[in-house]
Image (cartoon, helix red, strand yellow):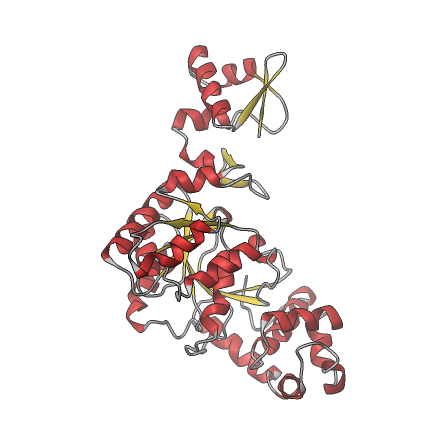
């Protein structure tokens, strides 16, 4: 999204005004996503919220005199314009909720961020994302498994999402980078303040092969309450969340809870039963989370996508399990569409022996990616 501070036509002026209103509200201390949602339901638009009186604001649940006063006195237009200048200087893009550029998966969660700051690039294929999270105080086993899984996910074309924290998060980002894949780091702080500070170089590498995302204003410093809040974005950007070495007090368990609320898959990698670092993961498995050992377990457990993802001009992904296919299986699958396709048409369209096409279709049927129909037709699930 362009960050032009000097709009040239009426459409740009309207978009700029909307952006200013959203940023004004995003700069109000104490205004969280759930309360913002309640205000939006009551008043209908950011501008109407800003124009409301203190008495009108206090008619909304969770809005007391202190927050009502903050809404009236903080987040001025001048402050929002200064924020826009910081955004432009840092080369950051803004994605506003309910606008076309806003990530679709994030827009479907109960309390999506009003605005997302993005440094780097978001691409359509990032809809195929898995979060890998866990303890900051992890063991060598945890680091190894996080790096290994992230590499495997990246090699299949999955974007790896994590929180740029020490421990498991850092290994997840590094694994995706080492495999040449894409990774997204969701930050609790503003993008002018990388936390932890020793991960500045890692953040710069993430920007080259993905992006940094946050809902916090540019200069927001670390605050304890921001980290659990940002975890809903980690899960919201993902098809599922993998926990590796999460103790019972780990903040990563917040991400698992958000994933459950958002109807995302929750996976956990088992560890030693006598290790404090693995107790949270073992509890999750006991309570119904899917036990995983590697990338195949993750992808096979994921159901059809809400919306097909166009990875390349010739490849459309409808189920993540398709990413584990061989080149030949993928070529054959992409000739079958969601409506019935004649097997003879598939054979004619591909430079492979008919017997191999038929055997490949049998494999795809066993993997529940296609279904045979009477009369020599197949259909894609």
> Residue 297 at what x, y percent from top left?
40, 39
> Residue 130 at what x, y percent from top left?
44, 50
Q: Looking at the image, which residue is at 34% across and 62% down?
A: 135
Most foreground residue, 316 or 43: 43
> Residue 209 at what x, y percent from top left?
37, 54
Most foreground residue, 41 or 99: 41
State the residue lying farthest toward the front: 274
- Does the image show residue 300? yes
**In what quadrant of the picture does the N terminus appear?**
bottom right
Most foreground residue, 270 or 260: 270
> Residue 309 at what x, y percent from top left?
53, 42
Question: With respect to residue 254, does 176 lie above or below?
Answer: above
**In what quadrant of the picture does the C terminus appear?**
top right
Question: With respect to residue 363, does 219 lie above or below?
Answer: below
Q: On the rendered structure, is 101 left or right of 141?
A: right
- In the rendered picture of this protein, how many numbered marks are placed on residues? 0
Q: Looking at the image, which residue is at 51% across and 62% down?
A: 232
């Amino acid at each position: 999204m362009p960050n032009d501070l000097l709009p040239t036509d009426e459409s740009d002026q309207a978009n700029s005004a909307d952006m200013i209103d959203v940023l004004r509200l995003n700069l109000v201390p104490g205004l969280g996503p759930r309360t913002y949602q309640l205000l939006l339901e009551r008043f209908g638009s950011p501008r109407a919220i800003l124009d409301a009186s203190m008495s009108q604001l206090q008619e909304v649940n969770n809005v007391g005199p202190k927050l009502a006063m903050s809404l009236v006195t903080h987040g001025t237009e001048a402050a929002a314009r200064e924020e826009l200048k910081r955004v432009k200087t840092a080369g950051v893009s803004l994605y506003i909720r309910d606008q076309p550029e806003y990530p679709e998966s994030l827009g479907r969660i109960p309390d999506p961020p009003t605005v997302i700051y993005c440094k780097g690039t978001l691409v359509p294929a990032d809809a195929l994302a898995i979060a890998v999270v866990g303890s900051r105080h992890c063991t060598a086993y945890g680091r190894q498994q996080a790096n290994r899984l992230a590499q495997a996910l990246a090699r299949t074309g999955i974007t790896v999402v994590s929180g740029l924290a020490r421990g498991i998060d850092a290994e997840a980002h590094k694994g995706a980078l080492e495999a040449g894949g894409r990774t997204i780091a969701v930050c609790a702080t503003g993008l002018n303040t990388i936390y932890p500070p020793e991960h500045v170089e890692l953040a710069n590498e993430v920007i080259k092969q993905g992006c940094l995302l946050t809902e916090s204003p540019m200069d927001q410093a670390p605050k304890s309450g921001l980290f659990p809040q940002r975890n809903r974005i980690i899960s919201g950007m993902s098809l599922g969340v993998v926990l590796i070495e999460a103790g019972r007090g780990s903040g990563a368990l917040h991400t698992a809870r958000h994933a459950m609320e958002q109807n995302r898959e929750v996976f956990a990698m088992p560890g030693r039963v006598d290790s404090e670092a693995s107790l949270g993961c073992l509890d999750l498995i006991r309570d119904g989370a899917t036990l995983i050992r590697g990338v195949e377990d993750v992808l096979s457990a994921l159901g059809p996508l809400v919306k097909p993802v166009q990875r390349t001009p010739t490849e459309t992904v409808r189920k993540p399990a398709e990413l584990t296919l061989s080149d030949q299986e993928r070529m054959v699958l992409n000739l079958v569409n969601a409506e019935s396709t004649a097997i003879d048409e598939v054979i004619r369209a591909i430079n492979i022996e008919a017997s191999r096409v038929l055997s490949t279709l049998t494999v795809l049927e066993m993997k529940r990616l296609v279904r045979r129909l009477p009369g020599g037709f197949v259909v894609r699930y």
